[in-house]
Every structure is written in C-alpha cells, then in structure tokens.
Amino acid sequence: MSARSSISMPPKVNLRDDFGRFIPVHLDTAALALAVRSGRPVQLPSARVGGTLVQRQLQLSLRNLRSPELTAFVLKDGVAGSGSTVPLPPPATYQGIVQGGGAAVFTITDAAVEGSMLIAPDGWSFIEPLEPALRLRGVDPRVRERLLAKYNHLVYNVIDSHAAVRLGDDVAGQTAVAAAPH
C-alpha cells in the first residue's frame, strides 16, 4: 500500500500574473513522511504543461547530503552576543524513480513536501509548500487564510511559470548561431 496525496481539482490560481499557473493541493505530509521513511512507495501529484495534474507513484530512498559529523548548528543572538546549539532534525532528502520513467528528488517531512520530478514528455514538475509562496507574493492575509484552510502545497510545471525558457527560445533577443567545432 502506498501513501497517497489528496487531489481535489481546484480552480487554477494565477496570482496577478506574477508567477504563472499553479495548482493548490492538500498533501497528507505526515503519512507521506512515514511511508518514505519506511521505504514504501508514495503517490504525489505531477503537473503537466497547461495545468492538469496526474498522480505519479515514486519509489524514493534517503539521500543524506550532510556530513556525518554535522548534527547541530549554532543559533546566534547578535543582540545578546551569545549562541545556543540546536540539534538538526533527521535527514529527510530523498531521491528515486517515478514509475513509468522519470526521476525525483524531494525533501519530505511531517510538515512539508518540497522537490521535483523530471518526466518525459512533461518536463519538470515542482511541489512546494503553499504558505511561503503566498506570503512572498503579497497575497492578502485573509485570502491566504482561506486558501491555507483547504490547501497546503502548490504544484506546477516549470514551463507554465513565467520564467520558463523553452528549447529554441531566442533568450538574448538574437537568433542563435551554432559555433564551429574546434
């Protein structure tokens, strides 16, 4: 049995055209975290170009990027001129495969899911916590509260974001010229 994310197809949200198309979803982060820690497959939403979602099954393995000696950090209080040692939470970065082809890298904790899947022909699909994205884009606190009562993450395809560059795009305002081989 795999942990599943809950997808209710909400209306597409476009915040003042400053970000691009994304789809808010609700993920059961605690169940997903438990599943990946136990080595079980998980199902996560993936965004296709144009804003539709599809559930993808992922088999992820822990990929600890920390040095084994890194177990804590010092939190400094500049005003008091002091610091305290704070233990780091357990590693929660995973990488793996997407059933049917593709690769995935995610950080999955009891509180949040953040990462991406690369799947042909859909390209890069990202999942991020919703609250920081809304706050950073200046969404009114009342609107933010309403959205966060129902959704906790956003899913989008990089091609649908305004910063996307597609193969063959003239990004420099000039036609690309192939360089001669050396």
Image (tube, rainbow, N blue to C red):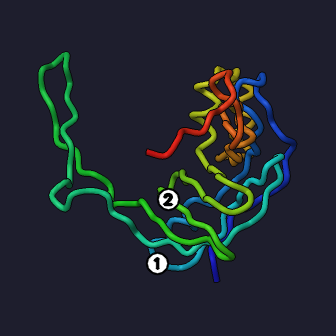
Residue shown at 44%/72% (left/top)?
61
Dot 1 or dot 2: first in sequence order is 1
In the image, is 168 to the left or to the right of 114?
right
Element marked by disc 2: strand
Quadrant of residue 92 in the image? bottom left
Quadrant of residue 53 in the image? bottom right
Residue shown at 54%/53% (left/top)?
115
Residue at image mark 2:
108
Spot occupied by residue 35 in the image (x, y as percentages of width and height): 53, 73
Kindly identify the amino acid type of the residue bearing the numbered disc 1: Ser
Task: Say if 85 sits above or below 57 in the image.
Answer: above
Quadrant of residue 80 in the image? top left
Residue shown at 84%/47% (left/top)?
10
In the image, is 14 to the left or to the right of 56?
right
Residue 62 disc label? none
Element marked by disc 1: loop
Of residues 174 and 180, the one nearer the viewer is 180
Spot occupied by residue 128 in the image (x, y as percentages of width and height): 59, 46
| Other-residue count near label 2 (Cα within 10 Å), few / some / many at <14 / 14–19 / ≥20 | many
| Other-residue count near label 1 (Cα within 10 Å), few / some / many at <14 / 14–19 / ≥20 | few
